Image: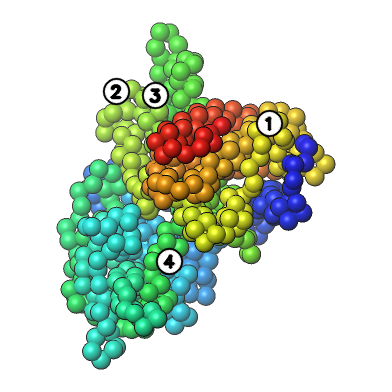
Amino acid sequence: DLPAVGQGEEERGQEQQTRTEVFPYPEIGNEELEEINQLVAPVEKFFNEEVDSAKIDHEAKIPAETLNGLKELGLFGIMIPEEFGGLGLSNTMYARLAEIISLDGSIAVTLAAHQAIGLKGILIAGSEAQKQKYLPKLASGEHIAAFCLTEPGSGSDAASIQTRATLSEDRKHFLLNGTKIWISNGGFADIMTVFARTEVTVDGVKKDKISAFIVERAFGGITSGKPEDKLGIRGSNTCEVSFDNAPVPVENVLGEIGGGFKIAMNILNSGRFSMGSSSAGMIKKLIELTSEYAATRKQFNKSLSEFGMIQEKFAVMALNAFVMESMAYLTAGMMDRPGLADSSVEAAMVKVFSSEGGWICVSEALQVLGGLGYTKNYPYERYVRDCRILPIFEKSSDWSSVPLSFLCSLSREMKKGNIGLALGMMGKKLKSSFGVSVDLGLIGKDGVVHPSLAVRTSCKSLKDLSSFFYLVCFPEAQCFFFPGKCKETIVDEQLILKRVADLVINLYAMTAVLSRASRSISIGLRNHDYEVCKVLNILRRNRSSAIKHFLELNDHFVIIQSNSNLPNTHI
C-alpha cells in the first residue's frame, strides 16, 4: 500500500495506536480459560435440564427453585469482585456466560437487569462504604437490584426525567417523589439505582441537575405496580415503581450530586456489548434446532436442507452469529485491557448490529419450519417474541445511532472555532477520491492482517469501506462550516445519521471478523479455513451494503444543499 498523501508522524502514531486496539484479536490466558470452562459446564447443564422455558413463558414467572439454582451457580454476582462475594469475572468471561444464559430470554433479562445495570452504578461510581454495604448480598442473590430511569414522559430522552429528590430540613435525607415505568425486577427488587432531579448551585445560580441514588425498598414510601403483560420475555418482572416521599440517606447519593446523568449513560454504555454474545448464543441454538428439522423434513422427494433457499437461510444465521461473536468479544477484550480509551461507541455498535441481526435470524429460523414454527408446540414463536425486545432495550436502537454524541461533540468544537481539533475528532482528513491510496496498515511489511487474507478481496473491501467513511465525514463537516439551517440541525437529521452509523457499524464488523480470522490462521486454529470462508462472504455483503448506504447518504446531501442554497460538495 502506498502511504497516504500528507500524512504526518502524529497521525501515523494515532493509526498505530488504533490498530493495536483491534489487532491482534484478544485472547484469554490459560488460567482464565480453565476457569471459564469450569463455569460453563454446570451452567449449560442447569439450563438444559432445570430450566423449563415454555412453562416460564406460559406462567409469566420464573419459579423460585429456578432462581435459587441461578443463585447457587453464582450468576447474580458474575462481575462483582471476589472481595465482595462475587465471581469477579472479566467482561470476556461475562460475555461467554451470556451466550448460555440467553437460551431463556426471561432469565437473561432478570440477570441483566440485576447486574448489567441494576448494581452496576455501585461498581463504577460507588464509594468503598457503599460497596461494602450492598455488594455482598447482591452477589449472593439475597438482594436483587433494579435500574430506575425511564418515566412516563421520558424514554430514550433520559435528561427529561421529572422525578425529584428534595433535601430534608435536617439535611440528613433526600425525599424522593415520582414514578418510574418499565422497570425490570421492579416488583421485587430490594436495591434500586434511582435517578432524580436535584437542585444544585452553580456559580451562585440554582439549577436542576440529575443525581443518582441507592434506594432500599426497606426505606419505605415505595410501591410497585401490577406486572406488565408483555409480548415476550414474559417471565421477567416488569412494572411501574412509584416513590412517595421515600427517604434516602444523604450517604446513599451515588457519585456526586448533579452527576447522575453521566453515571446513567456509563451504566447503559458498559452493558451493551454483551448483547452480541447473547444474540449469537440464541442464534446458534436456533441453528441446532432448525437443522435437525431441515435434514429430516422432505418435500418433492428431497430434504429441505437440499434446497438452495433453505441453505441461504442457514448461511444468514451462521454469518450473523459469527459477526456478533466477533464484535462482542473484540469489544469485551478492549474493555478488559487496562489503559484503553472508553469503548462505549463500540458497545453501541455491537448492540445495534446484534439486535437487528437477531431479529432477522429468528424470523429465518421460523420460516424454515413454516406453519409448525408458528405454533406454540415449538419454541420458535417464543424466540421471535423474546427477540423483539432487543432493538428497544437499553435505549432504542433508533436513538443509539453511533455518530450522534460524536457529532454533538464535533459541533461544539467547531462553534468554538477549534476547527483543527474538530477535524481531528473526525478521525482523519479527507482522502481525495482521485486515486490516492489510503494506508490503513493492514498489509505489507508491518501489516496486521494475515498474508493469506491480504491476497484476497478482504483488504480491498475494508479499504473501500474506510474510504466511504472518509468521504461521508467531509460533507458532514462542511455543514458546520456553512451558515444556515444545515449547520444548526445536523444532529437532528436522523436519516443522515442513521446511514453514517450504518457505515461505521459495517466498518467495525469487518474489522472484527478480519482480526478474528487473522488470529485463527496465525495460531493454526482448527477449521480456520471455514472462518476465512465466512469472513470473505461477510466482507462482500458488507461492502455492497455500504455502497447502498453511501449512495443514499450522498442523495440526502444533494437535497440538503439544494434546499439550503449551499455550495455543491457532494461526491
Tell me residue 51's x, y (percent).
36, 48
Tell me residue 280's x, y (percent).
48, 41
Query: In this view, which residue lies farthest toward the bottom?
Result: 170
Residue 565 location, quadrant? top left
Q: Nearer the viewer, residue 442 or 298?
A: 442
Q: Amino acid at mark 2?
A: Gly
Q: Earlier in the sequence, mark 4 or mark 3?
A: 4
Q: Which residue is mark 2?
A: 371
Residue 182 location, quadrant? bottom left
Q: Nearer the viewer, residue 475 or 447?
A: 475
Q: Which residue is mark 3?
A: 368
Residue shown at the point (46%, 32%) measured from the top left: 558
Q: Amino acid at mark 4?
A: Lys
Kindly report the distance in space between the C-alpha atoms of the residues bearing marks 2 and 1.
54 Å
Check residue 434 in the rendering and tell me which mark sits there, or answer none.
Answer: 1
Kindly report the distance in space between the C-alpha atoms of the residues bearing marks 1 and 4.
43 Å
